[in-house]
Image (cartoon, helix red, strand yellow):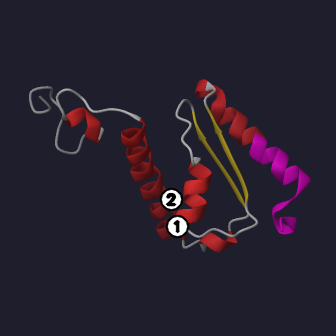
């Protein structure tokens, strides 16, 4: 199906879509999200050389998917971020979540500038 659709080998397709009938549920959605989020965060740390323990604020968002544990909890635990990190996960409110997250970071920085975040 993928070959006849014009999609190449480098096209991302969720693993659950490769089965007939498609196998989709909470477990599959969490697995897919973890693969994407962990890969992106790993690449970010590798490319920037930032030490995960130096991160004081973590705000993550997703327009619709709201897993438990949250994305922030998954990232904090997987990458051993500091115990007193200010971590916020915003989701389930549609496409506007990106702007809301930016505003949230702005508000956090105004109340506790980076140099003063414990």
Disc 1 from disc 2: Cα separation:
6 Å
Q: Is residue 67 above or below residue 94?
A: below
Could you tell me which residue is drawn at 70 percent across and 40 percent down? 101
**Residue position marked by numbered label 1 in the rendering:** 45
Left or right of 49, for residue 7:
left
Could you tell me which residue is drawn at 83 percent across and 53 percent down? 109
**Residue position marked by numbered label 2 in the rendering:** 41
Q: Residue furthest right?
A: 111
Image quadrant containing the C terminus: bottom right
Secondary element type, mark 2: helix
Image quadrant containing the N terminus: top left
Percent coordinates x, y for residue 4 in the rendering? 9, 27
Left or right of 56, for residue 13:
left
- In magenta segment, residue 116: yes
Query: Which labelled disc corresponds to residue 105?
Result: none
Q: Let me know if residue 12 appears in the view.
A: no
Q: Residues within 10 Å of mark 2 (few under 14, many from 20)?
A: some
Q: Is residue 51 above or below residue 93?
A: below
Percent coordinates x, y for residue 106 in the rendering? 80, 46
> Which quadrant of the figure has residue 89?
top right
Left or right of 1, for residue 10:
right
Magenta-drawn segment: 104-118
């Amino acid at each position: 199906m993928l070959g006849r659709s014009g999609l190449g080998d480098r096209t991302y397709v969720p693993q659950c879509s490769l089965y007939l009938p498609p196998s989709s549920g909470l477990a599959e959605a969490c697995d897919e999200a973890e693969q994407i989020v962990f890969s992106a965060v790993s690449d970010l740390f590798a490319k920037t050389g930032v030490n995960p323990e130096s991160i004081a604020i973590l705000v993550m968002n997703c327009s619709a998917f709201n897993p438990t544990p949250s994305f922030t909890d998954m990232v904090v635990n997987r990458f051993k971020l500091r115990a007193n990190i200010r971590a916020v996960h915003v989701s389930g409110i549609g496409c506007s979540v990106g702007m809301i997250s930016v505003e949230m970071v702005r508000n956090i920085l105004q109340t506790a500038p980076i140099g003063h975040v414990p």
